[in-house]
């Protein structure tokens, strides 16, 4: 025997299904954005130091211990480690997580406002380039100010 539901209930169930499906899609975009911007953290750190950023595994900037896969999950790893290195206990800057969250938010915002298309991808890339440039510039200015104070 089939369960009979009226038209309004059918519409309501359909709307709930659409909301759940869209939430999963946006969550997926958030995760993809966070992963991509996590790689930008590598570029922000390595590019000014003239280190190769396309090869070589990630390591702790303090003890230089090679990081395992479970240490590299954007946002989740930083939270589960309470912002400290698993190996030396040194504090990991929250800015890595902030960049990852910004990547997730950028992916969600651009796909919600522009749709899932090439424009959203271009806007996301532009956001990444601006953020990377801003962080590299910020680090250089901070480094120069630190040098002036030391002299
Ligand atoms: Zn460490």
Image: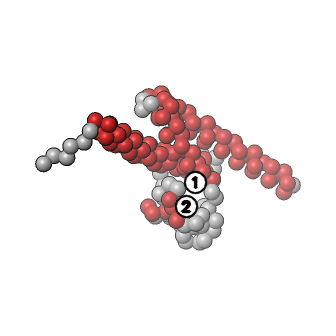
- Viewer-side residue, 22 vs 66: 22
Q: Residue at x 80, y 52 (%)?
A: 147
* Figure check: 72 above or below 120: below
Q: Residue at x 66, y 40 (%)?
A: 134
On the image, which quarter does residue 9 sit in? top left
What is the secondary structure assignment of the residue under circle 2?
helix
Q: How is the image coloured?
A: secondary structure
Q: Which residue is mark 1?
A: 97
In percent of width and height, residue 66 lies at 50, 64
- In the image, is 71 to the left or to the right of 48? left
In percent of width and height, residue 95 lies at 63, 53
* Figure check: 66 above or below 141: below
On residue 11, the disc is: none
On the image, which quarter does residue 93 sit in? bottom right
In percent of width and height, residue 37 lies at 53, 46
For the C terminus, give its image quadrant.
bottom right
User: Do the numbered discs 1 and 2 sit on residues whose CB atoms are within 8 Å?
Assistant: yes
Dot 1 or dot 2, earlier in sequence: 2
- Viewer-side residue, 112 vs 34: 112
* Figure check: 62 above or below 123: below
- In the image, is 132 to the left or to the right of 71? right
Q: Residue at x 51, y 45 (%)?
A: 104
What is the secondary structure assignment of the residue under circle 1?
helix
Are there few (<14), some (14-19), or many (20+) residues within 10 Å of tag 2?
many
Are there few (<14), some (14-19), or many (20+) residues within 10 Å of tag 1?
many
Q: Which residue is mark 2?
A: 78
* Figure check: 19 above or below 59: above
């Amino acid at each position: 025997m089939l369960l009979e539901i009226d038209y309004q209930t059918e519409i309501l169930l359909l709307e709930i299904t659409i909301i759940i499906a869209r939430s999963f899609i946006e969550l997926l975009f958030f995760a993809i954005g966070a992963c991509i911007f996590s790689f930008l953290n590598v570029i922000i750190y390595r590019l000014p130091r003239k280190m190769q950023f396309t090869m070589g595994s990630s390591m702790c900037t303090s003890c230089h211990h090679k990081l395992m896969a479970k240490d590299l999950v954007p946002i989740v790893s930083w939270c589960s480690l309470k912002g400290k290195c698993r190996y030396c206990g040194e504090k990991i800057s929250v800015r890595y997580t902030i960049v990852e969250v910004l990547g997730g938010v950028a992916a969600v915002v651009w796909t919600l406002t522009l749709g899932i298309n090439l424009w959203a991808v271009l806007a996301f890339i532009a956001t990444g380039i601006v953020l990377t440039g801003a962080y590299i510039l910020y680090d250089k200015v901070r480094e120069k100010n630190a040098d002036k104070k030391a002299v």
